[in-house]
Image (cartoon, grey):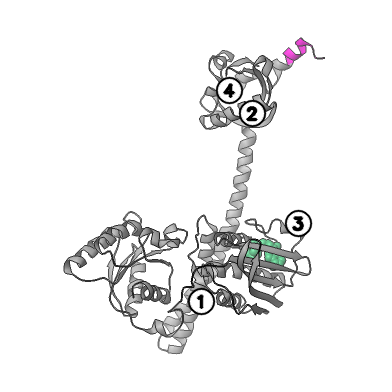
Amino acid sequence: MISSIESERIFSYALDLICIVGFDGYFKTLNPSWEKTLGWSINELKSKPWLEFVHPDDRDRCIARRKKIIENGELLQFENRYICKDGTYKWLNWSCHPFPDEDVIYGIARDVTEEKIYREEAFNNEKLKSLGTLAAGIAHDFNNLLASLYGNIEMAQKNSDIKEKVEHYLGNALESFSSARNLTSQLLTFSEGGAPVKKIGNIAESVINCCKFSLSGSNVACEYDIDPDLKPVSYDPEQISQVVQNLIVNSKQAMGDNGIIGVSVHNIKNGKGDFVRITIADSGEGISEKNLENIFDPFFTTKEGGSGLGLPTSHSIIKKHNGYIEVESQEKVGTVFHIYLPVSENVPDNDKVENGQKSETQGSGTILVMDDQDAVRDIMKDMLESLGYQVIEAYDGEHAITIVEEMKLKGSLLRCAIFDLTVPGGMGGKDAVRKVKEIMPDMPVFASSGYSSDPVMSEPEKHGFSASLKKPFKLKDVHHIIEKFAG
Ligand SMILES: Nc1ncnc2c1ncn2[C@@H]1O[C@H](COP(=O)(O)OP(=O)(O)OP(=O)(O)O)[C@@H](O)[C@H]1O
Ligand SMILES: [Mg+2]
């Protein structure tokens, strides 16, 4: 047995903070370590309820824990912050034991402030490292795309008198531009938000096109097995293409750029509901059981130069489509990914202008374009005029409202308006559309933005817009949307 003199000495010399706290909320006994750690005298600590020394943000948690200790007995490893006399805070890690017969709790706390700071620094360093890898990867991809854009546009300029060459170089430039657009939207969907901008329809064509695109210039081919009576799903074509592209590229890499990838798209009914299932099967190196647990973690990669974002991005996209992903894999045999997308009950949107002739028809009428960036307004004006429309420009929401009021006074009609959502330092599209609709209630207004994660972009109708246009857009996108909603 420990004598009272021994326990007295342990109490006096312990580095840990030892205390006895009454159920009344006041300290009864404290060892000298309290004074050394927090700077308050023992009397000062005893003069107020202990809760007043606890950081205000930790108080509710402390009260709940105290209740639990009294009800359930001992508590280990609980952390909270105590204020020091100099106004700073120290993190204490507690173990406590109640003695209900005596209405007291015995507590021993350890100062873990330094350890906490160290842990946080290590965590931030890890995050910075990941961010660095990501930034380097993106910079690399973007520089390549910019090099191609530069080169091709310069070559087109040099050969401006030879029509075929101009077409060739500009065609290449447009392709690089598409890839750049894919890259930014990959990043955006990975960021918070990234709500899908969905359409309803048969997904097979998008899947096949995307597989072909992802394998261009490679030795790998796809073998397709597509259900001829595929049910419609509600999907964001760009986002789903990104998922398919990520999976196809992974398969291609796993097979060392050689072999055949099986791609099938089928209707499936299972315990979870009605789905269209896209299956991508390769005969590559496979994934070990251990790695299989991590492949959806951001930045998990086994590849030199891989960013480890392909699968987590895909996972987050499919989740936002209310679907799910399954994977089966065997080392040295191959890997199969299944993507399940819920079948849509609604009628498919018929893409009238999607391909061909109709986009050749001339537009007419006047369109109001509001964007704070001159370059964006200029190119939109040229694009719309090339389609046959007339264009009036506004540099912010208030300017747009003034123009609409003037048009109304003159009795002139606007066919529609395209409003940028974000105008730094000025009125953006979201506020402007409300006012403009009061003046010309029947005029369709389209939201345009480079932030596809903005909720207005996925549900434009809820905010007074007729539809949304994701930046950067193509001539076809603009024409399509005007014909469809302002026809
Ligand atoms: N089809 C596959 N066959 C074998 N391994 C795969 C396959 N798909 C994914 N993996 C494993 O999962 C890891 C994570 O894949 P993910 O696509 O997220 O990132 P990554 O391909 O490494 O990099 P990136 O961001 O360039 O796509 C890969 O590094 C690889 O180890
Ligand atoms: Mg990948």
Residue 405 lies left or right of residue 332; in this view the side is left
Q: Position of residue 250 (x, y in %)?
A: 66, 68
Q: In this figure, which residue is indicated by the disc labeled 3?
A: 290
Q: Quadrant of the C terminus?
A: bottom left
Quick one: label 3, few (<14), some, or many (20+) residues within 10 Å? few
Check whether the beta carbons of the residues at disc 3 and disc 4 lie within 8 A of each other: no
Q: Is residue 248 magenta?
A: no
Q: Quadrant of the N terminus?
A: top right
Tell me the element at label 4: helix
Residue range corresponding to the magenta coloring: 1-9
* First along the sequence among labels 2 and 4: 4
Q: Position of residue 356 (x, y in %)?
A: 45, 84
Identity, as a three-letter code, of the amino acid under mark 2: Lys
Judged from this view, the residue extending furthest toward the left is 410
Q: In the image shown, does 331 or 162 lie closer to the viewer?
A: 331
**For residue 161, what is the image quadrant?**
bottom left
Identity, as a three-letter code, of the amino acid under mark 1: Glu
Ligand 2 in which quarter: bottom right
